[in-house]
């Protein structure tokens, strides 16, 4: 009797460790769900029998079919595009999605982790956000798989990531302006903590260097991807003794902010200044003028991140630990040859 009591104390977490799978995968088998490969199911069932694990229907620890989608902030149209891609795949897979914003604050992140434990999420997609190392460790302890979209900083080697070809996009945008005859090209950067921001800046630098044009530090101004940074950055560039004839903003929102700064000064786009953005948000094709930009496949990035986290939740390996989807230059009416 004592031996049977000891055997019944085995936890799902221990079963997952011995089976080499995630906790949600063991929970799926315990709860009789079909979305587990036959080989993995057999391995888990053998361990459950060996340990004498007693299934309890509707137990509090049972895991729902849920994934968490976590942003730093939600006040951006590009977040909506990622959500759209995540929801499409999750809905088709019969999985619910919980969307959260942690606002870059450790207190918010800790509260989110508390909530995640309570709802027993099957996986997490983290978008351009940073979690404290101890929260990452807690996800690993819980066996909850994590996929990062547009990582901030260098991700751990065992952490799958999904991004876009930001360097190539930055280079394509700058080469487009160079091809129109522009030589003084201003650049409004994104948050330096993000790898995607640094890659776009590096692409801008590479294009200039490839054209034997010295990179002028005065033509590079800081930004944060939002309208106000584009507005302020454009004004700073226009105030230079020798202002640029073209501008590459590393997000569409900043490009739109720059266009507003030009409008308030009585300047025209592209007659007085050519402007290129980055993202290809739905709204920019209706801006005045329609914006030349680098298309970033945001919805597809959300879809791929969801497929990856669902594979991990099933105890399967991702198709690739590091995936970058192609960007594409979309030429509209906001750029023109240098007069």
Image: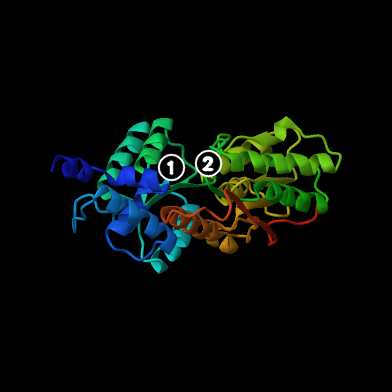
Check disc 2 and report the residue beneath it: 158
Residue 45: x, y in percent?
33, 56
Describe residue 166's horizontal placement relative to residue 191 as left or right: right
Check disc 1 and report the residue beneath it: 72
Q: What secondary structure is found at the residue carrying circle 2?
A: loop
> Which residue corresponds to the image point at 68% horizontal and 57% vertical from the top-left?
334
Res 288 quadrant in image = bottom right
Do we see residue 74 in this rendering?
A: no
Residue 283: x, y in percent?
53, 60
> Which residue corresponds to the image point at 29% horizontal and 47% vertical from the top-left?
12
Quote the CA–CA distance across marks 2 and 1. Answer: 22 Å
Res 336 quadrant in image = bottom right
Residue that protrudes farthest toward the right in the picture: 212
Decide which of tag 2 and tag 1 comes sooner along the chain: 1
Residue 8: x, y in percent?
20, 45
> Which residue corresponds to the image point at 32% horizontal and 40% vertical from the top-left?
113
> Does residue 185 sit above or below 324 in this rendering?
above
Res 131 quadrant in image = top left
């Amino acid at each position: 009797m004592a031996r049977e009591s000891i055997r019944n104390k085995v936890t799902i977490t221990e079963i997952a460790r011995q089976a080499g799978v995630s906790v949600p995968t063991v929970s799926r088998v315990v709860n009789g769900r079909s979305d587990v490969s036959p080989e993995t199911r057999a391995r888990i069932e053998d361990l459950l029998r060996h340990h004498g694990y007693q299934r309890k229907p509707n137990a509090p620890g049972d895991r729902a079919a849920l994934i968490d989608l976590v942003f730093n902030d939600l006040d951006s149209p590009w977040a909506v595009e990622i959500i759209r891609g995540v929801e499409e795949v999750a809905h088709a897979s019969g999985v619910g999605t919980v969307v959260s914003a942690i606002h870059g604050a450790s207190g918010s992140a800790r509260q989110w982790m508390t909530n995640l434990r309570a709802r027993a999420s099957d996986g997490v997609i983290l978008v351009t956000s940073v979690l404290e190392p101890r929260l990452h460790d807690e996800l690993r302890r819980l066996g909850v798989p994590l996929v990062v979209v547009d990582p901030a900083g260098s991700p751990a080697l065992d952490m799958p990531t999904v991004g876009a070809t930001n360097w190539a996009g930055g280079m394509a945008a700058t080469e487009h302006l160079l091809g129109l005859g522009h030589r003084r090209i201003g650049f409004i950067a994104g948050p330096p903590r993000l790898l995607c921001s640094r890659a776009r800046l590096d692409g801008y630098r590479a294009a200039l260097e490839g054209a034997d044009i010295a990179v002028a530090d005065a033509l590079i101004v800081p930004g944060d991807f939002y309208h106000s940074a584009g507005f302020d950055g454009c004004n700073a560039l226009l105030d230079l003794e020798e202002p640029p004839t073209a501008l590459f903003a590393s997000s569409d929102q900043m490009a739109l902010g720059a266009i507003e700064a030009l409008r308030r000064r009585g300047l025209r786009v592209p007659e007085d200044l050519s402007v290129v953005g980055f993202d290809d948000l739905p709204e920019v094709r209706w801006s005045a003028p329609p914006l030349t930009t680098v298309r970033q496949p945001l919805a597809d990035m959300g879809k791929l991140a969801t497929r990856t986290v669902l594979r991990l939740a099933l105890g399967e390996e991702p198709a690739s630990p590091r995936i970058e989807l192609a960007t594409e230059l979309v030429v509209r009416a906001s750029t023109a040859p240098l007069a």
